[in-house]
Image (cartoon, helix red, strand yellow):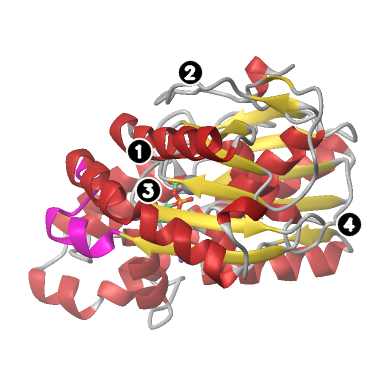
Amino acid sequence: MIATLGEPLTAWMPGPILGIETSCDETAASVLAVDGAVLSNIISSQHAVHQRFGGVVPELASRAHIESIETVSAAALQQASLAWVDLTGIAVTQGPGLAGALLVGVNYAKALAYALSIPVVGVSHLEGHIASAWLQDSAFPLPCVVLVVSGGHTHLYYKEPSGHCRLLGSTRDDAAGEAFDKGAQLLGLEYPGGPAIDRLARLGNPGAIVFPQSYLKKGSLDFSFSGLKTALLYTLQATSEQSRISRTADFAAGYQEAIVTVLVNKAFAAVHSSGVHALAVVGGVSANSRLRALLEQRAASEGLRLSLPPLAYCTDNAAMIAAAGRQALRAGLRASLDIDAHASLVSPFAQAI
Ligand code: KG4
Ligand code: ZN
């Protein structure tokens, strides 16, 4: 069973659910139909706000969420052709994330739940990413291995037939998305770095400049990306400015290759050691075109079921939060109206049931 924080809910009338996500730099709202179909998925990105700072500025993020949460939620309802009173539940990201940013969503969700007299559930952002694997393919099988690759997490899970997730491995230092973002900064590319490297790498040769791939000790399903970032720094320092400029695409392609190759090899190692036949890869980095291509090739050659959510469900969105919340509500959970944001909600699964 999914491990959303909450209290028992005696009676819940299944119906449309509003999901709200404000953990970082996207204000998002989505409505799911009673059968789980996505009726709307509205995302207001703050990239333009943070771009000139080269990263997310927490205070600016909170302000931008406050400014757009009402409009984004109303747009989600409108696109779903529903009225507020049609909603039967609300799911909101409770953590992990930026405290001030989370608070905007949590308080908005609580106020709405109170005004509409409907239940609210607090969802872990990670649970949301995991749930995104089933948004497009509700029949995707269990058990399976799930790789969550985002700006803050690189986690491998074994998802049991019951739905409960067991951690198989995680990063010991930087997350995969962080490695992309920091690498992009070293290469002088714009924020967010992942999409910028992805685009540039298509023009480069991934074999021209080879970067180290860290596998840690034999059989380990943990990750480490901090050495790779240092290798890029040293290589750039040892390269003339002219060559750095003319070969930026090769640097991007080689750097990206080192990250995605490790991700693919570890994900498949987890699949083999767990004896499952299905792999889901979710989170912002799963939008990476090279990663998607390698995963698809390997899954096809090994006859494995692969769930790679459509791009709109890879990076932060509220459809995934609504999906995780829907499972929680169906499982009979609800949060009380004094729930708070949890900036460092470590693992949803530790607080399970
Ligand atoms: O899931 P997400 O939107 O937010 C977090 O939960 O962190 O993931 C954001 C991360 C960022 O590090 C971003 O650079 C990375 O996902 N990302 C990508 C791509 N699109 C987003 N990384 C590589 N290639 C992409 N196309
Ligand atoms: Zn995320």
Badge 4 vs badge 2, beta-carbon distance below 8 Å: no
Q: Which residue is mark 2?
A: 338
Whole-percent x and y of residue 193?
32, 60
The residues colored magenta run 46-57
In the rendered image, the residue lying farthest to the bottom is 203
Disc 3 to disc 1, C-alpha distance: 28 Å
Q: Secondary structure at mark 1?
A: helix
Which mark is nearer the camera, 1 or 4?
Answer: 1
Would the CB of label 2 be found within 8 Å of ligand 2?
Answer: no
Q: Residue at x 35, y 76 (%)?
A: 200
Q: Amino acid at mark 2?
A: Asp
Instruction: Answer few, some or many: residues within 10 Å of disc 2's Cα (few below 14, many 20 plus, some between 14 and 19).
Output: few
Disc on the earlier residue, 4 or 2: 4
Q: Quadrant of the N terminus?
A: top right
| Nearest to N terminus: mark 3 or mark 2 | 3
- Alpha carbon of mark 2 to alpha carbon of mark 1: how far? 14 Å
- Work out how far the residue at label 1 is from the one at label 4, CA to CA, in angstroms: 34 Å
Q: Check disc 1 and report the residue beneath it.
A: 104
Q: Which residue position holds label 4?
A: 139
Point out the tag, 2 or 1, that comes first from the N-terminus.
1
Callout 3: helix, strand or loop? helix
**Residue visible at 59% across and 60% down?**
83
Mark 1: amino acid: Val
Image height of 37 relative to 116, above or below: below
Amino acid type, residue under disc 3 in the picture: Ala
288 sits left or right of 168 in the view: left
**Callout 4: few (<14), some (14-19), or many (20+) C-alpha neighbours within 10 Å?**
few
Residue 90 visible to an observer of this rendering: yes
Quadrant for the C terminus, please. top right
